[in-house]
Image (cartoon, rainbow, N blue to C red):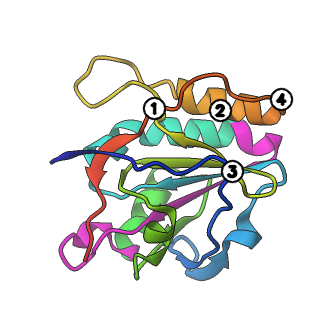
Amino acid sequence: MALVESNIFEIGTLAPSFNLLNTIDDNFVTLEELKGEKGTAIFFICNHCPYVIHVNDELVRIANDYAPKGINFIAISSNDVANYPQDGPDHMKHVAEELHYPFPYLYDESQEVAKAYDAACTPDLYLFDGDLRAIYHGRLDGSRPGSGIPVNGIDFRTALDHLLANSPNPNPQKPSMGCSIKWK
């Protein structure tokens, strides 16, 4: 398991559109259909990555805490399922149901969406305002598997709070870290 940092995604960049399979209900959905009134969070995740497994419960808590405030959440898996079959759509649906994901879990079979976002690792977290302009791209918090630091989502929660308060986030954005996206 190689540790990879997220790439730079410029603040103010418009979120690239997509039309992807939601593995939970087997329907195709677009970013425009899923975007939130006040903001949209996009998580590039997968089933097998220990860094994602480490933060999954907090991703669910954050979505449950902020969805009622007008923020929509979207999870996307872009991994090569030929070499990582545990990240395929059937397994994605099972994980989403088991962990009670309160957000769609989309399958990026072509990997074009991950490329459009310049996603590099899992988890790779993005936050967009109500106009789908990037306002945050970075880590959830300082916790990593085996670090002894509790998962609390403080960095991402702070970005969400500043978005809702319509105030700039004064905190420096630190890159997310995790397993590399498994490219074809």
Q: Residue flagged by tag 4: what amino acid is it?
A: Ala
Three-letter amino acid code at the position of disc 2: Ala
* CB-based contact (under 8 Å), mark 3 and mark 2: no
The one nearer the camera, 148 or 96, is 148
Q: Amino acid at mark 3?
A: Gly
CB under 8 Å between discs 4 and 2: no
Circle 1 or circle 3, nearest the eye: 3
Q: Are marks 4 and 1 in contact (CB under 8 Å)?
A: no
Distance from label 4 to label 3 (Cα)?
17 Å
Q: Which residue is mark 1?
A: 174
The picture places residue 86, in percent across and down from the top left corner, at: 26, 67
Q: Is residue 67 magenta?
A: yes
Q: Which residues are magenta?
A: 66-89
For residue 63: magenta?
no
**Residue at 46% in and 73% down:** 107
Dot placed on the residue nearer the N-terminal end, 1 or 3: 3
Q: Which residue is mark 3?
A: 12
Seen from the viewer's position, the closer of residues 90 and 165 is 165
Tell which of 133 and 105 is nearer to you. Answer: 133
- Cα distance between the residues tagged 3 and 2: 14 Å
Assess disc 4: are there few (<14), some (14-19) or many (≥20) residues with their C-alpha within 10 Å of its C-alpha.
few
Disc 1, SS: loop
The residues tagged by marks 4 and 1 sit, at their Cα atoms, a distance apart of 21 Å
State the image coordinates of residue 160 (x, y, percent, origin top left).
69, 35
> How far apart are the alpha carbons under marks 1 and 3?
17 Å
